[in-house]
Image: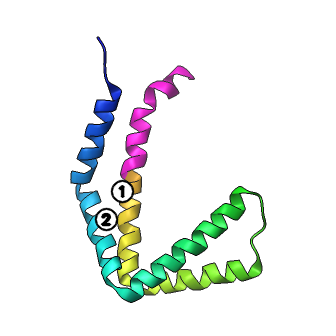
Amino acid sequence: MSVNIYDTANQLEQDLRKTEEFQKLDAAFKAVKEDEEANRVFNEFREVQQTIQQKQMSGEEISEEEAQQAQEISGKIGENDTITNLLEAEKHVGQMIDDINQTVLKPVRELYQ
């Protein structure tokens, strides 16, 4: 019996879009995009986050200025309900994807036990 695993993956992608978690993420992201201040702060947050992650991955130290900038943007994020809702929705979708990943990789993990 031949199985086309890619068909299964494509179906999973379509099903993911239909989940309540993804629908909430989609709505939360649209809300951020529609709110000029939230969108500006969120984009600033993403830039700072990317810079720090790139430095960490390359073994570079994070400067005091970058750490302070991250602190400041985190404070702004915490004060903005629109962005907080988006991050919460991202967390739920991320957890669902982690759960799916655990299920998909179960046969590989079992091989090494």
Quarter assignment of residue 87 = bottom left
In the image, is residue 89 part of the stretch drawn in magenta? no
Q: Residue at x 37, y 87 (%)?
A: 36
Q: Amino acid at mark 2?
A: Leu
- Judged left or right of residue 100, residue 57 is right
Q: Residues within 10 Å of mark 2 (few under 14, many from 20)?
A: many
- Judged left or right of residue 47, residue 99 is left
Q: Residues within 10 Å of mark 1 (few under 14, many from 20)?
A: many
Is residue 35 shown above or below 87?
Answer: below
Q: Earlier in the sequence, mark 1 or mark 2?
A: 2
**Magenta: main secondary structure:** helix
Q: Quadrant of the N terminus?
A: top left
Residue 96 drawn at (x, y percent): 36, 50
Q: Which residue is mark 2?
A: 25
Q: Which residues are magenta?
A: 96-113
Q: Quadrant of the C terminus?
A: top right
Is residue 111 shown above or below 28?
Answer: above
Quarter assignment of residue 6 = top left
Residue 77 drawn at (x, y percent): 47, 81
Q: Are marks 1 and 2 in contact (CB under 8 Å)?
A: yes
- Could you say whether the residue bearing mark 1 is in a helix, strand or loop? helix
- Judged left or right of residue 55, residue 7 is left
Q: CA distance from mark 1 to mark 2?
A: 7 Å
Q: Amino acid at mark 1?
A: Val
* Res. 93 mark: 1
Residue 8 drawn at (x, y percent): 29, 32
Furthest residue to the top? 1
Is residue 56 shown above or below 86?
Answer: above
